[in-house]
Amino acid sequence: MRSVGSTLADFEQDLISNLYYQRGTTLESASGSDGYQTLALTVRDRLVERYARTAAAHYEANPRFVYYLSAEYLLGRQLGQNLLYTDTERFVRPIAADLGVTLEDLESYDVEPGLGNGGLGRLAACLMDSMATLDIPAVGYGIRYEFGIFKQAFRDGAQVERPDDWTFYGNPWEFPAPDDRQVVGFYGTTAAALDDPTGLRRQWTPGEVVRGEPSHMLVPGYGTQTVNIIRLWQARASRQSFDLSRFGAGQYKEAVEDIVRAENISKVLYPDDSTEQGRELRLKQQYFLVACSLRDIIRRYRLRNTGWDAFPAKVVIQLNDTHPVMAVTELMRLLVDEYKLDWDLAWSITRRTFNYTCHTLLPEALETWPVAVVERLLPRHMEIIYAINHFFLQEVEATYPGDLDRLRRLSIIQEEPDKRVRMAHLAVVGSTAVNGVAELHTRLLAATTLRDFAELWPQKFHNVTNGVTPRRFVRLANPRLSELITERLGDESWLTDLDRLEGLAGVADDPAFLERWRAVKRANKVDLAAHVERSTGVVIDPDALCDVMIKRFHEYKRQHLKLLHVIMLFNRLREHPDLDVVPRTVLFGGKAAPGYHSMKLLLRLVNAVAETVNTDPVVSRRLKVVLPPDYNVTRAQWIIPAADLSEQISLAGKEASGTGNMKLALNGALTIGTLDGANIEIRDRVGADNFFLFGLDAQEAADLRRDYHPRAYYESDPDLRAAIDTIAAGTFAKGDRSLFAPVVDSMLGRDEYLALADYRAYLECQERVEHAWRDQEAWARMSVLNSARSGFFSSDRTVREYCDRIWRVEPVRVA
Ligand code: OAK
C-alpha cells in the first residue's frame, strides 16, 4: 500500500491528486467548496493511515475496550483540529497563500456536526478526544441524525428554529461502512421458548424491522498515533420496504410509507416530545442506537474471543446518562433469548459490563417511560425489565425485610400516578459503577435523587469530575495565548500535561509578562468584536470588560438574574449619565428548547434589552448587550478566549457540573459564581481571592425553598424593584406592558430558582468585580492564576480517573 508522505511536497502532490480524482475538477475551475473538500480529504488521508495502524495494534493486543454509548456528540469543526493533530497546518498556510485564499476562508466551509444539545454532548466529545490522546482503545457509538440541533435565528428578537441540514454539501470526515449494517426490530409479540422450563427465555417476533447503517468519524489522539472512531448509526428501511406494485398503481405516497417511517428514526436530534408520537419516536431512537451498537460490540468481541466468560473482561460499556439504558435489557435479551445463556449468568455478565454516568439533578430531566409505551414498542424488553425488577426487589427485601416503602421507592417501576419505567433505576441496577460529574453533584445524588441506592450499594457510587480538552479549548480556540504559554513554559508538553500550567504562577507578578497576557486578551477581544459586528451589527469596545454568559437557556441557570443586573446598570446610567461605572459588554449566547416557551420569551427579552441599551446614546457609551444568534461549539471557540468575566450563576445544587466554567477559567476569565457544580472545585483550586463568589449554598437554597416569598425581596430592595418595574412598564417593548408580563409574573409569583433571593448578593459581588477591574494589573494577575491553576480540569485527568477507578483499561501504544 502506498503510504502518505510527510513533506510539504507530498502534501501538495496529494492535494492536486485529490482535487482531480476525488473532486473531479481542476485548479482553474475549482470552487471554494472544492478547495475545502480537497484539503479535508488530504488531511483525512493522514488520519486514515494512523487509523489503520491503530486497528491493527488493537487486533493484535485484543485489549479491553471502552464502548461509550451516547445519544449526543457535539464535536465542533473538524478541519482545524485535524490540521493540528496531523501537524499539517504549516503546509497549508503557504499553499493557500500562493492560491490567494486564507485558511480561515477554507475553514468557513467546515460545518460543525451539531449532534447534541449542550453539556452532555460536548463532554462526550472531550472524553473521546482524551481517550485517543491517552491511547485508550475505545469506540464511541451514537446516532447520525440527518438534522442536528436546530439553527437559531431571531425574528423581531424571538427565536426561530431552522433545520440543520449539516450534510448538505457532503461530510468529508466520515466513512460509511455499509457492510457492518445491523437489523433492528420493533413492536410485535413474544411467546414462550419451547426449550426453556424456567420461563425466563422467550421469543420475540418484531412487527417492524429497520436497518441501521453505520458510518464513522475519526477521533485522533494528540501527540500520539492512536486514531479511534465514533460510529454513528443511520436508520434505513429494509430493502423490501419499497412497494413496487403500489408505485406502479400510482400510489406514490403509500409506496414509500415504510421507508419514511424507518428513516424518521434518525431524522432529527431529540424530536419534539410534547406529543405522544414524538415521545415514542424518541424511545425508538434510543433503542435503535442501543440495538445497533450492542450487535456491533458483540461482532467486534467475537473477532478475537470465543464464549462469553471473557465478555466483561474485554468489554466495558459506559452509559452517557439514561438515554442508552435500554442497552441493559437488550444485552439480557441477546444473551438469554438468542445466545441461550441462563438468566443468572447473563445477568452477571450484564451487570459487570455496564457503568452509568448521571448528568443531572433536576427531577424533570430524569427519564421515565410509560409502561404502556415500552410494552407496545419493545414488548420483550418490558418483560425483561419486569424480571430484572422482580429479582432486584427480592434482593432489597432480603436486605430490608418488610420495608415496603423502600421497595416502592427503589422499584424500577413507578406505580403512581401512572405506571412508568424509571430509567435511572434500571441504569443503577444494571451497572457496576455509577458516577456523578462533580463532587457536589455526586454528593447530592447520593443524598437525594439516588439516596436509597447509595444506601443499598454505597460502593457503587463514584465521583469523576468533568474536564475539557485543552487542545480544542485552548490551543485551537486561543492560539495567541497558547503561544505565550508555550514560550513561557519552554515547550508544548502542557497540551497533554495540563498541570504544567502551574509554571505560569511564577510569572503572575512579572509586570512585563502581565502586559503580554493583557495584550493577548485584547487582541482576542478585537477578533470577537469583528464576529459580533458581523452577526449582530453591534459595535463593541475591545477595552470594555467582556462579561459572558454562554450556555443553554434554562431557568435554573438564571439568565434572568444576569439580565436584572443589566437592567439595574441601565437604570443607573440613565438616571446618572456621568456615573463612574466600568465600561462593560454583556454577551449572552445560547438556545432554548423549541417547546420551552418561558425561556424563548426570556431570549426575546434579552434581545429587547439589548436593542434598548445599545441604541441609548448615553447608556451605550458604557454598556452594550449582545446575543449573537446560534451559539454552538464554533462560536464558543470565538467567545471564550475574549472573555474577562465568566457568569456561572445557577442556583446552588442545580447545575451538575458545568464545563463552560472550566473552558473560561483556563482561558483566563475570572468566574463570578455560586457554590454550584464544578464552580466549587474551580474556586478551591484558583483560590478564593481569584474568584467572585456570591449567593446561597445548596443547603441554604434547599431550606429557603421550603418557605419562599419572592415578593418580599422585591418589596424590600429598591434596585430590584426598579429593575423588575422597568420590564413591567413595557420599557423594552415600546410601551407594551403585556409582552414580557409572564417574565415578571414568574419572578414575583414562584421564582422557582430563587433569583430574587440571590439578587442583592449578586449585585454586591458585581461591585467587587468592578472594583477589581479598575486595577488592570491586579486583574491580569488573577487571570494568569486562573489559567495556571486550572490544569486539573483537563479531560485527560477525567479519563485517567475513569480508567483507574471504573473502566480498569490499559493503554495500547500504536507504532
Ligand atoms: C442532558 C439531558 C439529560 C440529562 C442531562 C443533560 C445534560 O446536558 N447535562 C449536563 O451535563 C454536563 C456534562 O456532564 C454538565 O456539565 C452540566 O452541568 C449538565 O447540565
Image (spheres, grey):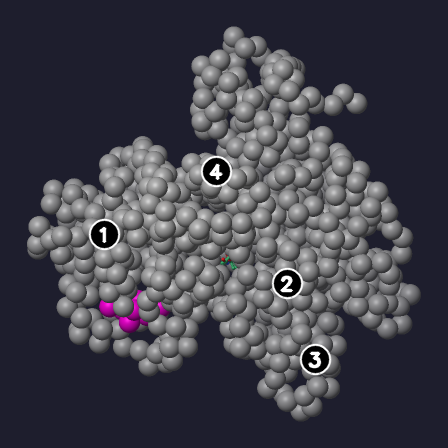
- Callout 3 touching callout 1 (CB < 8 Å): no
Q: Which residue was labeled with disc 3? A: 393
Mark carried by residue 356: 2
Provide the residue span drawn in magenta.
753-760
SS at badge 3? helix
Verify whether residue 181 appears in magenta: no
* Residue 229 appears in view: no
Left/right of residue 483 with respect to residue 586 in the rendered view: right
> Disc 3 or disc 1, which is closer to the eye?
1
SS at badge 2? strand
Q: Which residue was labeled with disc 1? A: 774
- Callout 3 touching callout 4 (CB < 8 Å): no
SS at badge 1? loop
Mark sitting earlier along the chain (3/1): 3
Q: Which residue was labeled with disc 4? A: 487
> Disc 3 or disc 2, which is closer to the eye?
2
Q: Residues within 10 Å of mark 1 (few under 14, many from 20)?
A: few
Q: Disc 4 and disc 2: Cα gap in Å?
A: 41 Å
Q: Amino acid at mark 4?
A: Glu
Mark sitting earlier along the chain (4/1): 4
Q: Disc 4 and disc 1: Cα gap in Å?
A: 28 Å
Q: Disc 1 and disc 2: Cα gap in Å?
A: 47 Å
